[in-house]
Every structure is written in structure tokens, then in C-alpha cells.
């Protein structure tokens, strides 16, 4: 049994929680000489709320995701991680991360932020991190943001 991670999948969405998860993933990937798979899932369910589905919304979401991941890739290289993949997908973040993408990249560790949702969204759809912890086939690290003292 090896205690080193080889394929780390980190889910980022532009939130502060995801940024903390990304920063932690860089140090873990560097220590393990692992491949870092940066993932952004464009949640197509949010498009349903917009009556006239407008292609430009999807295009803007795609370019935001690509910019975000490209910036993180540069930062990961600067942090000593050689192998970095960028993955942008459409669908439900919960199932895409824990089932489809983790299998696709043969992830042995998934890293995600503690929450990207407000209390009402968590109540209605459950948090992504909670779902990943329950359903992933590999180790999961849920990163909490540092509390800023008052």
C-alpha cells in the first residue's frame, strides 16, 4: 500500500473556500509529486432559472472558468507542481466531481472547499462537499477557510 497521492482532483468555482482548497492542494501535490487536476463544473441547473436561455451566458461561464483555471495553473507551477490539467465540464458539480471526473482522472484524492453555498441553498440541495464525502470512492479533504478575527 502506497501512502503517496498520484492524482489529485481539486474543485474550484471562484469562491474563497475554493481558493483555500486550491492553495492546500498545491502544497499536497508538490509534496507527493502528484498530478493536479483543476476542475470547474459549470452548473447547468442555474441556466434553468433564466427564462430565455441565452448562449452568451454559457459562453461567459466558459471563459470565466478557463481564466480562473489558467490563473490557478500558473500559480500551481510557481508552487512547484509540474503536472497540472485543466478540466471544464457542464452538469451537476456534486455528481460530476465525485463520480465521473474522479474516475476519468483516476483520482486518489479529491480536495474541495467546505462550502460555496448560502444556508438556504445548502438546505435545498445539500452542499457539494457533503455529497462528495459521502459518495467518492477515494480520499476526500474538505478545506475550511481560516476565520478572520473580529
Image (cartoon, rainbow, N blue to C red):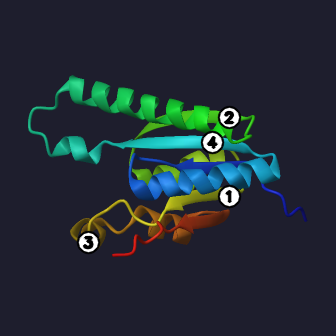
Percent position (x, y) of residue 10? 57, 50
Tell me the element at label 1.
strand
Query: What whole-number distance in Å separates the C-alpha atoms at marks 2 and 4?
Result: 12 Å
The residue tagged 2 is: 77
Ranked by sequence position, the earlier of labels 2 and 4 is 4
**Label 1 close to label 2 by CB (< 8 Å):** no
- Relative image position of residue 27 (x, y in whole percent): 70, 53
Lower sequence index among marks 4 and 3: 4
Q: CA distance from mark 3 to mark 1?
A: 27 Å
**Of the numbered discs in the image, which one, if any, rests on residue 109?**
1
Q: Please indicate, yes or no, whether residue 28 appears anywhere in the rendered image.
A: yes
Q: Earlier in the sequence, mark 4 or mark 1?
A: 4
Give the mark, 3 or 2, whose residue is nearer the N terminus: 2
* Residue at 75% over, 34% down: 82
Residue 119, which numbered label? 3
Are there few (<14), some (14-19), or many (20+) residues within 10 Å of tag 4? Answer: many
Placement of 149 over or under 42, stated as above or below: below
- Give the residue drawn at x 19%, y 44%: 48
In the picture of the structure, the residue carrying the numbered disc 4 is: 37
Real-space CA distance between mark 1 and mark 2, rounded to the nearest whole angstrom: 19 Å
Amino acid at each position: 500500500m502506497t501512502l503517496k497521492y498520484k492524482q489529485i482532483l481539486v474543485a474550484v468555482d471562484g469562491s474563497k473556500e475554493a481558493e483555500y482548497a486550491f492553495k492546500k492542494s498545491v502544497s499536497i501535490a508538490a509534496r507527493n509529486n502528484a498530478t493536479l487536476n483543476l476542475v470547474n463544473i459549470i452548473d447547468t441547473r442555474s441556466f434553468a432559472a433564466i427564462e430565455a436561455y441565452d448562449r452568451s451566458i454559457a459562453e461567459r461561464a466558459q471563459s470565466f472558468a478557463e481564466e480562473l483555471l489558467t490563473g490557478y495553473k500558473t500559480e500551481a507551477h510557481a508552487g512547484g507542481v509540474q503536472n497540472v490539467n485543466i478540466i471544464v465540464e457542464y452538469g451537476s458539480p456534486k455528481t460530476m466531481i465525485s463520480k465521473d471526473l474522479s474516475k476519468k482522472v483516476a483520482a486518489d484524492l479529491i480536495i474541495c472547499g467546505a462550502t460555496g453555498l448560502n444556508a438556504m441553498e445548502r438546505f435545498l440541495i445539500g452542499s457539494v462537499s457533503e455529497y462528495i464525502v459521502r459518495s467518492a470512492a477515494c480520499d476526500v479533504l474538505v478545506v475550511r477557510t481560516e476565520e478572520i478575527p473580529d
